[in-house]
Amino acid sequence: MSCFVSALSSSNQERSYFLKWMRMNLDNLSRKSLSSLREQYKENCQQLLENKEEIIQLDQQISNSSLGIEHFLCEMGQLYETAVLLPENEESRLQMLHLPWLCAELMLDGFPLELVDGDASNIPLRWVSDVLQYLDSLLQPNNKIMVVTVLGVQSTGKSTLLNTMFGVQFAVSSGRCTRGAFMQLIKVTEEIKKELGCDFLVIIDTEGLKSPELAKLDESHEHDNELATLVVGLSDITIINIAMENSTEMKDILQIVVHAFLRMKEIGKKPKCQFVHQNVADVSAHDKNMRDRKLLLEQLNEMTEAAAKMENKEEYKLFTDVMEYNPETCNWYIPGLWHGNPPMAPVNAGYSEAVYDLKKNMIDVIGKCKHKTPGNNISEFLEWTRSLWNAVKYENFIFSFRNSLVADAYMRLCTEFHKWDWSFKKDMHSWLTVAEIRVSNFEIIKLKSDKSDLKDLLCNLKQEAVAKLDALEKTTMENLSKYFEQTEGHVYLVEKYKEDFVSSVKSLRRETESSLRTQLEATVEIRRAKNNMNNIKKTFTDTMEKKVLGLLEDLRKNNSSKCDTHITDEQLDRFFDQIWQKTINELLFTGLNQRNIFDLVFRQLRENMKQKGSSVAEQLMTVKLKDQGREEFKITKDVFYKRWIKRMTNNNSAVDLQKLADNIIQTCSQFVLDKTARHSDYHDTYIQEILHIIDDRLMSNKNIGSDEFELSLKLHICGMSAREFQHMHDCFIKDNDPHRCLDQFKDKYRNDFKDLFHDRDQCQRKAEEFTTLCLMPAVETFIYSSLGPDIVDKMLQGKNAFQFSTRAFFQYTLLKQLLNEDNFEQYVKYISSYECFVKVWILDRITEQFSNGQEVSELEECHLRIITKEILEAVKMAQNETNEDGIKGFIQCICRKLGQKLIIPKDALETVMILNNASQEPFARWLIQFVNEMEQTLKEQLKKVNIQGKLSKLKMKPQDELFKRVFGCGKQCPFCKAPCEAGGEAHTDHFASVHRPQGLGSYRKISSKTLVTNICSTNVQSEKHFICFQTNYKRHPYKKYREIFPDWHIPADASIQASDYWKYVLARFNSKFAEEYNARPADIPLTWKFITKQQAENSLKESFSIK
C-alpha cells in the first residue's frame, strides 16, 4: 500500500500510466487464479453433499481472488479511517491526511469512488466525507449535481449500460463478484448545462443484487434491501435494469425496488425511475410490448401493496401512489449486446442505438427535474448521504426529521409560515382597531343626513371583515403555493406537509372570523348601552345649559338696569350654585339599570352544559354561583377521572389533572383581567369565550376528566369570573351615573358661565379644554393600540429573531438557558407546567429587552409624531370648510376627520361645546399651539411609565401573540413530556425532534417504581408495556401506543439514544426528580455520570441542528 500511495502521489501523467498498467496486470492475475478455482468448484459441485464445506471455502476464495484497483482505493480509505482515530499529533496520522486529496483528484480524472463497501456492507463515512469535501474545494463553490443510479441483477449488463451511455469505465469482466456501490463524477458541458440545471452528473453503479455467489456467502437479502434503499434515496433518476429472460429474478428485483421507492416517498424524496428491459429480441414495434408493460404495472401494483403493508402504510395501493410513473414513457427495450454467444459473436449495433435513445430521454427527464427537485451541491449531497445511511442502518424511514436536510427544509417552511401568519394577524388587528373606533365614534362622525344606526354599521363591518379575510386568506395561500414552487431550499422534501399548512391557513381564517364577529357584536352592544347612557346625560346637560343661559340673561338684564351696580365673581358663584342645586333637585336621574351578572353567567353555563345529562342538570339546580370560585380549586374524588374513581391510588394521575385545571384557570383569569382592565360594561360574549376556552382545553384532554370534573371546573371559573364582571359592571354604572357626571363638570360650567357674563374671549381656554379633555386621552389610547404589534415586530427582529423563528429553535433557547441556570425547580416547571413556564419566560424576555425604556420610547414617539401631524392636518382641513354651526360645527368637522384614528370621549366633547362662544379662527390658532404642546407633554408622560405598566395598557398583548407563535398546539409527549414541534395549527400528527428519558416525565418501572432511563423511540420498538389511566391501568404494549395516543407520532428506532443533554440533566438531578415524582431514583448508566456541561450543550446543538 505504501508503494501504491507513493505512485498516486506522482505527477498526473505518471499516475495515469501506473493505474492503467496496474489494472491490466491485476486482471491477468485474477484470470489465472479464477480459472483453477472454478475448475475445482465444478468438480466439487458434482458431489454436493459430500463436499459442502469445501464448496463454501471455494466460494470465499473465488470472491477474494476478484482483485482490482478499487480494492486498493478501498484499502486507502480503511487506512485513513484508522489513522484519524489516532491523536492529532501522531506521525502515523499526519502521514495519512493527504489520502482524501489524492482520491478527490482521482475522481476528477474519472476514477470511481467506492461509496458502499460491499464486503462490510458499510459506508466509511469519514473517508467518503473528507474525499467529497476535498472534491468540493477543488471545484467552483456551489456546483450543482444530479445523481443517476442503476439497480439490477448481477451480470445483466448494467455496468456496460452506464459505460455505453456516459462513456465511463466502471469495472466489468474478470468474473468479479464485487459488492457495494461506486460513484463517478461526469462534468456537464457548457452546451447542455443550462438545459440540465447542473454542473456535474454523479453516476452510481451498484453490483450484486440477487447475486447467486453472494447468496451463498451470507444472507444477502437484507444487504440488497439496504443497498437498494440507499442508492434510490441518493438518486434523482434510478434506472431499473431488468433481464427479460428471468421472470423470477425480475419479480424479486421489483419487490426490493418498490420497497425502496415507498420508503423514499415517506421521507419526501421522489426520484424518477426508468425501467430498462435488456435482451429483448424485437424492440422495433413499441406497441407489441404493450402487454408486457401492462403486466409490469400489475406486478408493480402488487409489490406496492405488499410493501405498504410491511411499512404499515396501507393507504398506498398502486405504484403510481408512490412514484410518477407512466408506462408509455418510463419503459425502454434494449436488444442484447451480442449477436449470438460471446466471445466470438459480433457486437449488436442496435444496442448502441437503443442506449443512445435512452440517453436522450434521460437528458430530457433530468432537465424536467431541475424545476421540482433542483440539484444539490456536494456539501448537501454529503449531508443527505450521512442522514440516509443512518436511516438505512437502523431501518428508520418514518421519522424524516432526523435527516438534517429535511429538518432544515421544514424549519425554513415553518419560519416563512410564521411570517405569513403574523402578517395575517397584524393586518386583521389593524382592521379591527379601526372598526372599533368607527363604532365608538359612530354618533360623532355620522352626518345628519345619515339615517343608519349601529345595527346597519355592524352588518357593514361584518361584510367588510369577510372581504378582508378572503383577501388575506388568498394572499397567504398564494404565498404558500409560491413557496412550494421554488427550486431552492429542498422544498420538495417537505411537500407532504403542504396540506397541513393549507389546513392551518383555513383554520386561522375560521378562528379569526369567529373572534372578529364576537368582538364586533360585543363592541356594538356596549356602544349601544353607552349611547343610551349618553343620551340620558345629554338630556341633563342640555337642561343645565338652558338653566345657566337663562340665569345669564336675567343677570345681564338686571345689571344693565342698574348701571351703578357691579356684580362680583363671588355673587356670580352664589347665583350659579343656587340655579345648579335647583336644577339638580328638579331632574329625575334614571341611569342604566343595574344587572345581576351572576344570573347572566349562570344562564350561559346552563346552556353550555345542557347536553351533559340529567346528573349534571340536577347538580346545577342545587348550586349557587355566588359561592363558587372563592377558594383554590382542588381535585377531589367526586370530580376525578372517567371510570377510575376506584383507582385513586395513582397520585400522578391526580397531579396531571390538577395541573390541567390550574392551566385552564390561569388562562381564564388572564382573559378576565384583560376584559376588566377596559372599564367597559359586561357582555354575554365574555363568558361565552371563557366557556369556549375551557371546552377547547378539555377536548384536547378528552380521555382525562369526567363530566363531574368539567362541571366543577366550570363552576369555579364562572363563579370567579362573574364576581369580577359584576364589579366591572357596577363600576361602569357608577362611573356613568348622570348625576356624578354633572358634578364632575360643575366647575367647568361655572367658569363658562363667568366668561359669558363678562364677555371674555373663550378661544384659548376652550382650545386647551378640547386638547386636554378630548384629544390627549384619545391620542394616548391610539398609541397603546398601535404599540402591541410594534413590540412583537421588535421581538421578532435582531437578537430575538432566532429564538422566536420556529418552535424547535425556541425549544433550543429554553433548554440552553435552563442548562446555564442549573436550577432544578426550573426544570420541573418546564417539564410539568410547560405552558405556564413558557408564558413567564416570554414576558421576562419582553421586559428584559424594553427595560431601559429607550427602544419603546422610540416606538411611542413615532406614533405620537404621526398622529399629531394628522390632527394638525385635520384642523387645517376644517378651517377650509364652511361651518354653519359655528364653533360646534368646526369641532365636529375636526372629529369627523379623525374619526377612523382617534376615539374622542363623547362626554368631554359635549362639555367643551356647551356654553362656548369662541370664534373659529382664534380657536384654531390656539388649538394648533396646544396640540404641539400636547406632543411634548405626552412624550414626557409616556417616558415615566415602565414597561410593565405599558404592557398592562396594551390592547394586543405582545406576550400572548409570541406565546401563540412558539407554543403551537401545546401537546406534550404522553410518555416523556417533550413538547410538540409541528408547524401550523392544524397539523394531524404531533411529533418531537428529541424525546427524553421517560423518567423525566415521571414514568417508572411497574414493579420497582424506579424512574426509567429509556426513551420513547426505544420503547415503541420493544416488547415492553405501559399502564396509565387511558389504558384503564391495564398493561398495553408500547408497539401499539397509537391505539391509546393516535395523534402522536413516535419513531420506532432503537438507535436513537437520549441526547447527552437529557442524560446530563437526569444524572445530575436524579434523586430530586425521584423525590418530586414520589418514585425511586433511576439506575443511571455509569457513562452518563461523566458527561460534562459542555458535552450537554454540544448535544443540544446537534439535536436541533444548530451550527
Image: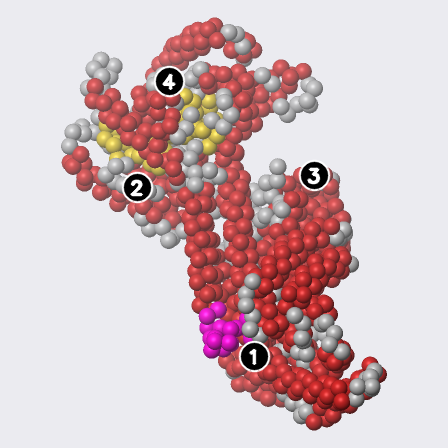
Q: Is residue 935 above or below residue 642?
A: above
In this rendered view, identify the residue nearer to me: 929 or 468.
929
Between label 1 and label 4, give the one nearer the viewer.
1
Q: Which residue is at a point 46% across and 19% down the rendered structure image?
A: 107
Q: What is the crowding at mark 1: few (fewer than 14 residues within 10 Å), some, or many (at least 20)?
A: some
- The amino acid type found where label 3 is placed reads Gln
Say whether residue 769 is magenta: no
- The amino acid type found where label 4 is placed reads Gln
Q: Is residue 685 left or right of residue 208?
A: right
Q: Which residue is at a point 25% across and 21% down the rendered structure image?
A: 352
- Could you tell me residue 2's position as x and y percent? 56, 11
Q: What is the crowding at mark 4: few (fewer than 14 residues within 10 Å), some, or many (at least 20)?
A: some
* Residue matched to label 3: 1095
* Residue matched to label 2: 325
In this rendered view, identify the residue nearer to me: 1041 or 702.
702
Q: Mark on residue 169?
A: 4
Residue 452 visible in this rendered orientation of the protein: yes
Q: CA distance from mark 4 to mark 3?
A: 46 Å
| Location of residue 243 by image quarter | top left
Between label 1 and label 3, give the one nearer the viewer.
1
Q: Please, what secondary structure does the residue beneath circle 4 have?
A: loop
- The amino acid type found where label 1 is placed reads Arg
Q: Please, what secondary structure does the residue beneath circle 3 have?
A: helix
Q: CA distance from mark 1 to mark 3?
A: 64 Å
- Span of residues in magenta: 439-461
In this rendered view, identify the residue nearer to me: 217 or 650.
650
Counting residues from the start of the chain, the first of labels 1 and 4 encountered is: 4
